Image: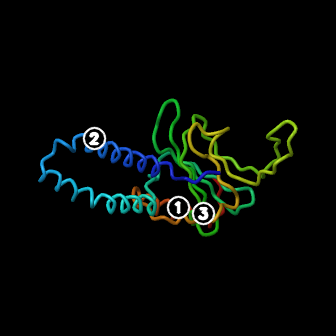
């Protein structure tokens, strides 16, 4: 299963490519610059590494995924987890969704995935065995929650049960966008869980 850095990763790649193009353009015109102009650009690019590192830390330490709309929830068969699926961005061919896994007892977010799919479906699997190669050995696949029927068009739409420590660590990142909605969602989730309801 892949780590969910979809939105942050795409933005980081865009920033790095923009910086690279700017550097190449500057190098091509460097010979035509006057001495004073060169000094100004040297000062700017001397501060660039600090800005890039600071920006990378910002995108790594904070969750920038919006809460989403049209959310659906479902409790796992064993009652330990609650899955939530919300639409983040509508696209006729392949809308973007966010899937979240919560602890059913505390309401704490344990893991999150962003992905694109044309067939969103929140389902729980006890695991299975499959044979990657016709003559190869069978491979055990553990329990997981899936937010898409079949593989997602883009991104990872499954979360292992129990979620990995890395998933739990990423889920602890504070949200930048839609923080108020997330807090309200957690309150509602806890209320539903305490009543034992299952969406």
Question: Label 3 crowding class (10 Å Cα cut-off): few <14, some 14-19, many 20+?
Answer: few
Is 163 on the left or on the right of 35, as rendered?
Answer: right
On residue 25, the disc is 2
In the image, residue 95 lies at what x, y percent?
Answer: 51, 37
**Of the residues under marks 2 and 3, which one precedes in the sequence?**
2
> In whole angstroms, how far apart are the C-alphas of marks 2 and 3?
39 Å
Q: Taking 190 as reference, is 36 above or below it?
A: above
Is 97 on the left or on the right of 164, as rendered?
Answer: left
Viewer-nearest of discs 2 and 3: 2
Local SS, label 3 = helix
**Of the residues under marks 1 and 3, which one precedes in the sequence?**
3
Question: Label 1 crowding class (10 Å Cα cut-off): few <14, some 14-19, many 20+?
Answer: few
> In whole angstroms, how far apart are the C-alphas of marks 1 and 3?
26 Å
On residue 188, the disc is 1
On residue 166, the disc is 3
Question: Label 2 crowding class (10 Å Cα cut-off): few <14, some 14-19, many 20+?
Answer: few
């Amino acid at each position: 299963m892949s780590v969910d850095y979809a939105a942050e990763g795409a933005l980081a790649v865009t920033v790095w490519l923009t910086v690279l193009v700017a550097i190449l353009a500057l190098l091509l015109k460097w010979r035509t610059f006057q001495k004073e102009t060169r000094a100004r650009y040297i000062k700017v690019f001397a501060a660039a590494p600090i800005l890039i590192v600071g920006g990378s830390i910002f995108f790594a330490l904070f969750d920038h995924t919006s809460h989403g709309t049209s959310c659906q929830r479902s409790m796992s068969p064993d009652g330990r987890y609650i899955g939530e699926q919300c639409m983040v961005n509508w696209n006729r061919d392949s809308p973007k969704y966010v899937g979240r896994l919560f602890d059913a007892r505390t309401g704490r977010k344990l893991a999150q995935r962003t992905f694109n799919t044309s067939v969103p479906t929140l389902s729980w699997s006890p695991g299975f065995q499959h044979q990657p190669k016709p003559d190869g050995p069978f491979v055990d696949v553990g329990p997981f929650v899936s937010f898409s029927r079949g593989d997602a068009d883009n991104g990872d739409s499954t979360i292992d049960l129990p979620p990995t420590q890395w998933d739990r660590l990423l889920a602890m990142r504070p949200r930048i966008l839609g923080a108020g909605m997330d807090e309200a969602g957690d309150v509602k989730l806890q209320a539903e869980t305490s009543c034992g309801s299952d969406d």
